[in-house]
Image (tube, grey):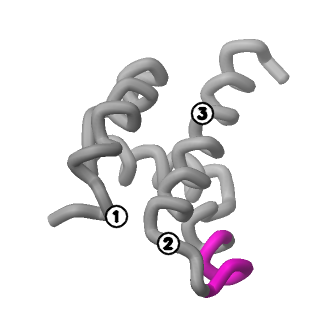
């Protein structure tokens, strides 16, 4: 099941980012990115949904992946 509109068209770019930061591809990787954020005490998917109630699914997952990438970058640099 596709997580968001035009999943097939967008997933190659998403997979590239997931792989670059050590996540599995596709839904598994996105869920792992979300769990990483949840383990740090926040859920960007829920934050996006609650603040932008009519946003598209791809926006929610973009916030998830962006937040997970920021966490991974901070771990690398120690910030």
Please tell me whether mark 1 sits on a helix, a strand or a loop: loop
Q: What residue is pinned by disc 3?
A: 69
Q: Is residue 63 shown above or below 4?
A: above
For the residues labelled 3 and 2, the Cα–Cα distance comes to 20 Å
Q: Main secondary structure of the magenta part?
A: helix
- Classify residue 25 as left or right of residue 49: left
Kindly identify the residue that appears in the image at 58 percent across and 84 percent down.
Answer: 54
The image quadrant where one finds the C terminus is top right
- Classify residue 3 as left or right of residue 60: left
Q: Is residue 48 shown above or below 52?
A: above
Q: What residue is pinned by disc 1?
A: 4
Q: Earlier in the sequence, mark 3 or mark 1?
A: 1
Residue at far left of view: 1
Kindly identify the residue that appears in the image at 29 percent across and 57 percent down.
Answer: 6
Question: Label 1 crowding class (10 Å Cα cut-off): few <14, some 14-19, many 20+?
Answer: some
- Name the mark nearer the viewer: 3 or 1: 1
- Determine contact: label 1, label 2, CB under 8 Å: yes
Q: What residue is pinned by disc 2?
A: 56
Q: Earlier in the sequence, mark 1 or mark 2?
A: 1
Q: Is residue 60 shown above or below 66?
A: below
Residue 72: numbered disc = none
Please tell me whether mark 3 sits on a helix, a strand or a loop: helix
Q: Earlier in the sequence, mark 3 or mark 2?
A: 2
For the residues labelled 3 and 1, the Cα–Cα distance comes to 20 Å
The image quadrant where one finds the N terminus is bottom left
Question: Label 3 crowding class (10 Å Cα cut-off): few <14, some 14-19, many 20+?
Answer: many
Q: Which residues are magenta?
A: 48-53
């Amino acid at each position: 099941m596709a997580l968001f509109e035009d999943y097939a068209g967008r997933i190659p770019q998403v997979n590239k980012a997931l792989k670059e930061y050590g996540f599995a591809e596709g839904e598994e990787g996105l869920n792992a990115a979300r769990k990483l954020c949840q383990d740090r005490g926040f859920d960007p998917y829920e934050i996006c949904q609650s603040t932008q109630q009519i946003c598209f699914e791809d926006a929610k997952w973009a916030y998830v992946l962006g937040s997970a990438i920021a966490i991974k970058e901070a771990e690398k640099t120690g910030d």
